[in-house]
Image (cartoon, rainbow, N blue to C red):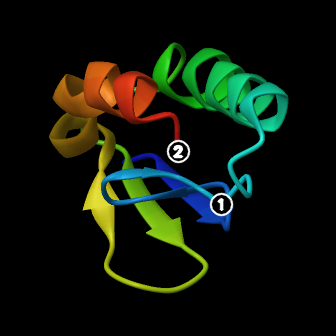
């Protein structure tokens, strides 16, 4: 089983706070997608810096929503 200790870069429901900076959000979402979602299976558990744990499979369907929201 894979595990990711994501700290403050991703949480259930979105990536970490980029303080409404579009460039920072674009960079963070790109890195989260290419370095985590694109390489690890749905069964991977994600342990954020605080809040609830989740899996990539639970979060993956919501990536378009994250993009649309911009945070």
Instruction: Classify residue 62 as left or right of residue 46.
Output: left
Q: Secondary structure at mark 2?
A: loop
Residue at 22%, 31% in the rendered image: 62
Secondary structure found at label 1: loop
Residue at image coords 52%, 44%: 71
Residue 51 drawn at (x, y percent): 40, 84
Give the crowd class for mark 2: few <14, some 14-19, many >=20 residues within 10 Å.
many
Image-quadrant location for residue 5: bottom right
Of all residues, the one furthest to the bottom in this rendering is 50
| In the rendered image, the vertical position of residue 50 relative to residue 53, given as above or below | below
Q: Which residue is mark 1?
A: 17
Query: Would residue 63 be seen by someone viewing this image from the given angle?
Result: yes
Which residue is denoted by mark 2 in the rendering?
71
Mark 2 or 1, nearer chain start: 1
How many neighbours does mark 1 have within 10 angstroms: few (below 14), some (14-19), or many (20 or more)? some
**Mark 2 near mark 1, Cβ–Cβ under 8 Å?**
yes
């Amino acid at each position: 089983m894979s595990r990711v200790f994501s700290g403050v870069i991703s949480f259930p429901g979105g990536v970490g706070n980029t303080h409404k900076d579009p460039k920072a959000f674009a960079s963070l979402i790109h890195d989260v997608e290419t370095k985590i979602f694109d390489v690890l299976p749905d069964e991977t558990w994600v342990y954020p810096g605080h809040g609830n744990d989740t899996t990539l499979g639970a979060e993956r369907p919501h990536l378009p929503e994250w993009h649309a929201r911009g945070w």
